[in-house]
Image (cartoon, coloured by chain):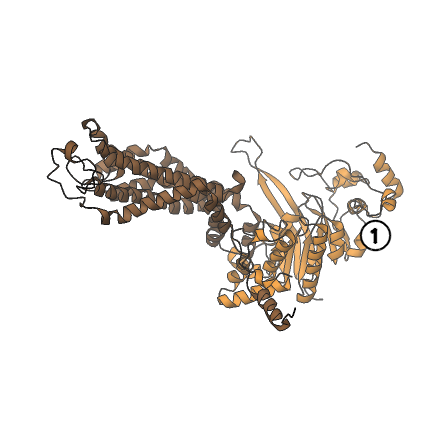
């Protein structure tokens, strides 16, 4: 067999020079996550729910503001879910299309969950990492502040905030954001303390890398695994909190709605035989929570293979 | 006479330690990790530092590089006192003094790839460099320490221990330092890899004219690499001497005991080697013995040793002992029969 030596040599040269792609810890984790069936199922559910929230409007025959005067007063007989009337999920007590309302509620609930978790991740991570890395008296003061904030019964404060400043989405975000980062900052601080004395941090200090850069480049990337897991578990917690507040009637205001508000309305009319008013919002609520919990579990397994 | 690169005088490091269960208002006790160390280091020279665990070797290294607060003087070649500099002033010298750490994998950030790790000192000290120039220098340095430059995008967990230590060395060398402090750089590696890494260090030192402070507890490694050797015990210098003088005719009883404990890879000679047994443990650095710190375990200790601290005497070879000199057969025998 004839081998073209020149060609082989040039091939060998290019192979020696081409940069080998590294297998980062993130890529490893992604591979483990993809292999986890429950987590992938959860992810698919979440994607579908998100698509439903984003594009569900286009499939709706009715807008969420229109009242269907035909069904008004006869919701039990005429407002049941049906393709023919265009009310896929039926109508609510006032004759509004429940499908459109559910899309609207899903949007708000997901937004509350994600914004709340995002605030927790950003504020909590930076606060906890700073306290843990700086240490000493700064750490003491920062963490005692967290202790004090934690000792306040937050549901009570949240309800007071909503009553005093009026019920609005902004106030709800503010209230949930204020409390959500506390746990996160504690977890992050604990992790930072274990990282702080590792040799690679010492190496960076010895070279003279600034504290801020050490936190951002060395500490935070090594924390992100824990943070990501906690954040995915925090989203459903935020959704639950919002739903509870809305269930009490203090959350989002009409004409806006959320899962909590829809479930509350549905539960109130349960006895009149209009069970679909409860079932549809509750279904979306439940599968989303399941989705987040499965994804969170999968992330934990993927990011922390030693912990299994 | 040329100035030494580094002139350390009476360097001390102590940590305040609270005893368990102590009341908040009781003052913490001081743990003297390093209690007055003197030595000089010439440019391009290798100083080996040996001693038992807990003798303050690593703390000394960390004090020189400003990771732990210290007192005393550590004069750099341009006259600056490294101990006394503010963090901002110290920045200038951090590029000149780099460190190689003990655990090769733990000293590399697992979330950064090799290129980022090696480039970090460079981007810290020469922020003006363009991205492509940094990459070119990193690749050059990888080649220099025996790594394939095309592995620049790999992550630490994809390398072996020896390769990780080479990455650590490349990171230290990239800013062209004058002094590298190696804190037990090979004790976590296999023996065959140890030899590779040490020979790499020796070669780089010759090529670049580096000074090395080489901390180890493996005496044969120190013997291989060092020009001079400093022996530490409980935070104090026992003896500093040129390598040959120390290994062939040490004056301090502690050094002799250390040397006699080195196993000889020859069963016949190993069997009739005269081992000087050291009884007991290292005394607590919270409450060191009066006088000579080694007196509690010294086969030659006398009343004077408990009263006065022996000064570090001599010019070329310096010994901190009231009664220096090789141990006699009788002393070794007496130390052996002494009940432990």
- Read off the chain for label 1: B
Q: State left or right for residue B2 relative to residue B333.
A: left
Q: Residue at x 81, y 49 (%)?
A: B251
- In this view, the residue in front, A2 or A37, is A2
Question: Residue A193, image x and y in percent?
Answer: 50, 42
Q: Secondary structure at mark 1?
A: loop
Question: Residue A175, image x and y in percent?
Answer: 29, 40
Q: Total of numbered circles in the picture?
A: 1
- Spot the orange chain and give its letter: B
Q: Which residue is mark 1?
A: B249
Q: State left or right for residue B307 relative to residue A73.
A: right
Work out which residue is located at the far top of the displayed protein and give it: A271
- In this view, the residue in front, A227 or B178, is A227
Question: Residue A145, image x and y in percent?
Answer: 39, 39
- Spot the brown chain and give its letter: A
Q: State left or right for residue A250 relative to residue B164.
A: left
Work out which residue is located at the far front of the displayed protein and give it: A1
- In this view, the residue in front, A127 or B325, is A127
Q: State left or right for residue B92 relative to residue B181.
A: left
The answer to whether residue B148 is above or below residue A203 is below
The answer to whether residue B268 is above or below residue B228 is above
Q: Residue at x 57, y 40 (%)?
A: B16
Q: Is residue B131 visible?
A: yes
Label 1, residues with CA under 10 Å away: few <14, some 14-19, many ≥20? some
- In this view, the residue in front, A305 or B57, is A305
Question: Residue A142, image x and y in percent?
Answer: 42, 41
Query: Is the N terminus of chain A in the top left, top right, bottom left or bottom right quadrant?
Result: bottom right
Q: Is residue A158 visible?
A: no
């Amino acid at each position: 067999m004839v081998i073209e030596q020149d060609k082989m040599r040039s091939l060998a040269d290019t192979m020696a020079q081409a940069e080998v792609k590294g297998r980062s810890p993130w890529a490893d984790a992604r591979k483990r996550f993809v292999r986890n069936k429950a987590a992938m199922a959860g992810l698919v559910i979440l994607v579908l729910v998100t698509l439903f929230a984003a594009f569900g409007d286009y499939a709706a025959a009715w807008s969420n503001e229109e009242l269907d005067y035909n069904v008004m007063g006869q919701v039990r007989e005429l407002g049941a879910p049906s393709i023919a009337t265009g009310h896929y999920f039926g109508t609510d007590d006032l004759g509004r299309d429940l499908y459109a309302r559910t899309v609207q509620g899903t949007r708000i609930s997901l937004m509350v969950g994600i914004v709340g978790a995002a605030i927790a991740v950003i504020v909590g991570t930076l606060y906890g990492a700073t306290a843990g890395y700086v240490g000493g008296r700064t750490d003491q003061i920062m963490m005692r502040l967290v202790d004090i904030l934690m000792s306040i019964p937050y549901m009570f404060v949240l309800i007071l905030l909503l009553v005093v400043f009026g019920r609005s989405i902004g106030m709800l975000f503010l209230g949930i954001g204020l409390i959500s980062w506390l746990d996160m900052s504690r977890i992050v601080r604990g992790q930072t303390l274990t990282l702080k004395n590792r040799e690679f941090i010492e190496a960076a200090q010895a070279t003279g890398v600034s504290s801020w850069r050490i936190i951002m480049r060395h500490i935070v990337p090594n924390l992100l695994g824990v943070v990501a897991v906690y954040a995915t578990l925090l989203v459903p917690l935020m959704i639950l909190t919002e739903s509870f507040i809305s269930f009490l009637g203090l959350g989002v205001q009409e004409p806006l709605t959320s899962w909590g508000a829809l479930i509350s309305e549905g539960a109130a009319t349960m006895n009149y035989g209009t069970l679909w008013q409860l079932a549809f919002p509750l279904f979306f609520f439940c599968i989303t929570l399941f989705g987040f919990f499965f994804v969170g579990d999968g992330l934990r397994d993927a990011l922390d293979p030693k912990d299994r | 006479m040329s100035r030494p690169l580094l002139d350390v005088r009476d360097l001390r490091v102590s940590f305040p330690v609270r005893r368990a269960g102590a009341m908040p208002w009781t003052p913490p006790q001081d743990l003297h990790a390093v209690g007055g160390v003197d030595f000089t280091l010439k440019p391009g020279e290798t100083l080996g530092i040996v001693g038992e665990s807990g003798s303050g070797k690593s703390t000394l290294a960390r004090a020189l590089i400003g990771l732990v607060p210290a007192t005393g003087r550590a004069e750099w070649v341009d006259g600056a006192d490294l101990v006394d500099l503010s963090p901002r002033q110290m920045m200038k010298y951090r590029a000149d003094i780099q460190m190689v750490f003990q655990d090769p994998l733990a000293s590399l950030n697992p979330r950064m790839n090799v290129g980022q790790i090696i480039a970090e000192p460079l981007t810290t000290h020469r922020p003006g460099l363009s991205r492509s120039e940094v990459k070119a220098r990193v690749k050059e340095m990888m080649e220099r320490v025996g790594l394939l430059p095309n592995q620049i995008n790999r992550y630490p967990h994809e390398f072996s221990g020896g390769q990780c230590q080479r990455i650590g060395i490349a990171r230290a060398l990239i800013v062209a330092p004058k002094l590298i402090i190696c804190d037990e750089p090979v004790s976590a590696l296999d023996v065959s890899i140890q030899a590779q890494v040490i020979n790499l260090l020796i070669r780089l030192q010759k090529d670049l004219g580096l000074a090395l402070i080489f901390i180890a507890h493996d005496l044969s490694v120190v013997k291989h690499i060092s020009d001079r050797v400093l022996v530490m015990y409980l935070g104090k210098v026992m003896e500093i001497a040129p390598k040959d003088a120390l290994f062939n005719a040490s004056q301090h009883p502690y050094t002799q005991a250390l040397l006699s404990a080195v196993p000889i890879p020859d069963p016949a000679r190993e069997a009739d080697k005269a081992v000087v047994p050291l009884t007991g443990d290292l005394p607590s650095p919270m409450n060191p013995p009066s006088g000579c710190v080694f007196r509690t375990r010294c086969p030659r200790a006398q009343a004077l040793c408990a009263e006065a601290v022996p000064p570090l005497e001599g010019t070329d070879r310096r010994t901190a002992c009231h009664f220096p000199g090789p141990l006699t057969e009788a002393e070794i025998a007496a130390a052996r029969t002494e009940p432990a």
